[in-house]
Image (cartoon, rainbow, N blue to C red):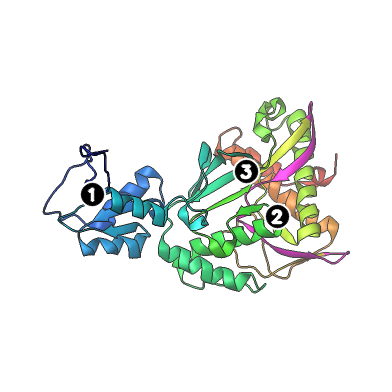
Amino acid sequence: MNYNETGNRKYVPVALRTASYIKNITANYSSIFKNVMGWASAQGSEILFFDCHEESLKVQRELGVRVEIVSHEAGVTWEIYERALEKYGGGKDPKDGPPKLGKLLGEGKFSKVYEAADDKNSVIKILKDWTTEKNRRLLQIYDVIKTGRPFDPGNNTEDHYPLMIALELRNLSIINELEEPKPEDFSGWFKMKKIVGTHIWDHPLYKRHPFSVDFQEFVRACMHLAMDSIEEIVKKYGVEHCDAHFKNVVFNFDGNKPVRARLLDWGIAVKMKWDDSQYIRGDDFLIIVPPYQDIRAGAKYSPSSFRRYWIAWMVKTEYDALWSRRAITETDGKAFLQDLDWWYRRP
């Protein structure tokens, strides 16, 4: 801070000792801020930019960066700075940005997931490469799917990412795991219920050879528990999780016995109805359909055929992953998958 002799901050320019001033800047503003957002893992709405050039408003339109235009003569005074903070920061509007982030828990192609620093029972997902335009399309798409109608992006690949997130928000809202913001107020992040449990690979039995009896009996028991969770949520909430491989499931164990499974990551899930005799899949449009699946709108399953469908998918997905990691050979793995009858029998 820079104070004058009276201690009055009101008209004193802010001194930034670590900043460089280049009078004739020719770099592209959008390119600069895309780089900043990348290395800082920040959304445009998390950045406040003071500038005296009107062309800098372009990054506000394109990237959502908050821009305040100042005069060449005055620069950024404390009054201007504090007025901008009051305008953009410190409020509870979800568009002001996420709650305080804790430890990074994981990272994928589209997002990073953090602990909520002030809430041990919640996690926060921050989307990557999220822009004002993507947010605008998400809100439009959500207006469609919240009515129960499917949204088909057709050949417009620009709608794929917003549609995926819109479906995830809808699904989390339906199963009561979305905490904030409301989908209608979305701006690139959301806070959800923390699902507690242990991943299967952290249990000693998972470290046995994939063709050993111990491994197969243990994995089969875990798969049937995951299937129980899929069915329970379909019956209770009307949503079918369509990506319940082991990365997206956590378990409770009693020694070597798995006793409960909980599902994570609701981005790949569709509406499904249980009419007391069969499961009937809804007509949601999925951008990503995992390998070995045949997700057909309107498909009907008896309880036994529904379980066989998903257990078969889990086994194929698991052994595909095992030969991809070279724990087994692909030849042996494919031969092993020719007969899955044993896997369908509940332990």
Three-letter amino acid code at disc 3? Ser
Report whether 296 appears left or right of 231: left
Rendering quarter of residue 68: bottom left
Q: Is residue 291 above or below residue 5?
A: below
Which residue has dot 1 on it?
A: 11
Q: CA distance from mark 1 to mark 3?
A: 43 Å
Extreme-right residue of the structure: 276
Q: Earlier in the sequence, mark 2 or mark 3?
A: 3
Disc ID at residue 122 = 3
Q: Which label sits in the foreground, 1 or 2?
A: 1
Q: Tell me whether circle 2 and circle 3 mark residues in contact (CB < 8 Å).
A: no
Badge 2 density bin: few <14, some 14–19, many ≥20, Cα 10 Å: few
Q: x, y (%) of residue 90?
A: 46, 50
Three-letter amino acid code at disc 2? Asn
Q: Tell me whether circle 1 and circle 2 mark residues in contact (CB < 8 Å).
A: no
* Residue 25 seen in the current view: yes
Magenta residues? 254-278
Three-letter amino acid code at disc 1? Tyr
Q: Choose between 51 and 310: the one closer to the eye.
A: 51
**Magenta span includes 265:** yes
Q: Residue at x 74, y 64 (%)?
A: 272
Which residue has dot 2 on it?
A: 176
Q: Residue at x 25, y 50 (%)?
A: 77
Q: Earlier in the sequence, mark 1 or mark 2?
A: 1
